[in-house]
Amino acid sequence: MLGVATLVRPQSLALAPLLGLLVARGPLRQRLLPAVIAAAAAVCVCLPWTARNCVRMKHCALVSVNGGWNLLIGADAESTGAWSPIKVPAACREVFDEAQKDVCFGREARRYVREHPLAWASLAPRKLAATFDYCGAAPWYLHEASPAAFPWEAKIRLAKVETVFERLVLLGALVWAARRAAPGEGPLRFVRAAVAAVGAVFAFLTHGWLAYLALLIAGALRVRADDRSAVLPAAALLVLAATMLTHAVFFGAGRYALVVFPLLTALAPLCATTRSRTSPGT
């Protein structure tokens, strides 16, 4: 499944070994083999497409040749942190092969990061804001597909419904993160509750990405405190962390957060339960 996901969203490949570690049981040494198997299985699904790239693109990219493009969009003196038309560096203007142009873009992006590390790092909050404050993929695509059938007013109405739903799910997940995970937690529970409370405030404000960051912190403490935690909470937090890290490095866009919402929608109802599962055998 993650191999198929990688073919349409290459960063999904990073989740394969991590989810392999998560699902396996026992000490770390026993969990390494399932992690390797999961990663190898995902790569094997992609190999036919990689072979195609070697032949057609003259470059053996695992899935696609736009990593350099995407890195450059978020590593430029005029970058806003969100998507923008790429500004071709002088060094790449005479490179016309698609794969080699991507290599050139990646090289120039890394050069910019080395020369302006603080300017590049300071864009991370804006990238996360562009990714998590408002998704808007569904109304945007519907309106672009047919403005007559789905006019601007319908786009705004659907955007409101989508935003309210996303923030309510986020609040439910924050409540889950704040609740007692196990008897005798001590001060850890109050730390989680405090972080979740701060996140709940930002869930009502424009910059909701700070609420997602608070959920990541409080949720990680919750999973650590509950040794009986099910796979769902850890998987949701893992995907959230991977999404935030990826788009803090590249650039942000609301559609990239879509992968997080199904997991948080499943996680949010756990706010009504004390434990994430009723018994070790469930």
Image: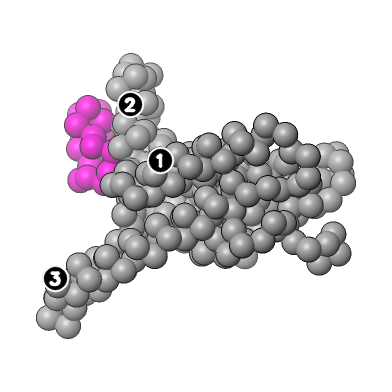
SS for tag 1? helix
Between residues 53 and 158, which one lies in front from this camera angle? 158
Q: Quadrant of residue 231?
A: bottom right
Query: Can you identify the residue that label 3 sits on?
Result: 152
Kind of residue sitting beneath label 3: Trp
Residue drawn where x is 36% and y is 19% of the image:
117
Point out the frontmost of discs 1 and 3.
1
Query: Can you identify the residue that label 2 sits on?
Result: 122
Q: Earlier in the sequence, mark 1 or mark 3?
A: 3
Give yes or no for contact between labels 1 and 3 (Cβ–Cβ under 8 Å): no
Tell me if residue 263 can be seen: no
Kind of residue sitting beneath label 2: Ser
Query: Can you identify the residue that label 1 sits on?
Result: 210
> Alpha-carbon distance for marks 2 and 1?
15 Å
- The segment highlighted magenta reads 76-94
> Alpha-carbon distance for marks 1 and 3?
29 Å
Q: Quadrant of the C terminus?
A: bottom right
Q: Neighbour class for label 1 at 10 Å: few (<14), some, many (≥20)?
A: many
Residue drawn where x is 20% and y is 37% of the image:
87
Q: Earlier in the sequence, mark 2 or mark 1?
A: 2
Between residues 7 and 235, which one lies in front from this camera angle? 235
Q: Neighbour class for label 3 at 10 Å: few (<14), some, many (≥20)?
A: some
> Alpha-carbon distance for marks 2 and 3?
34 Å
Q: Earlier in the sequence, mark 2 or mark 3?
A: 2
> Residue 243: within the magenta?
no
Residue drawn where x is 78% and y is 63% of the image:
278
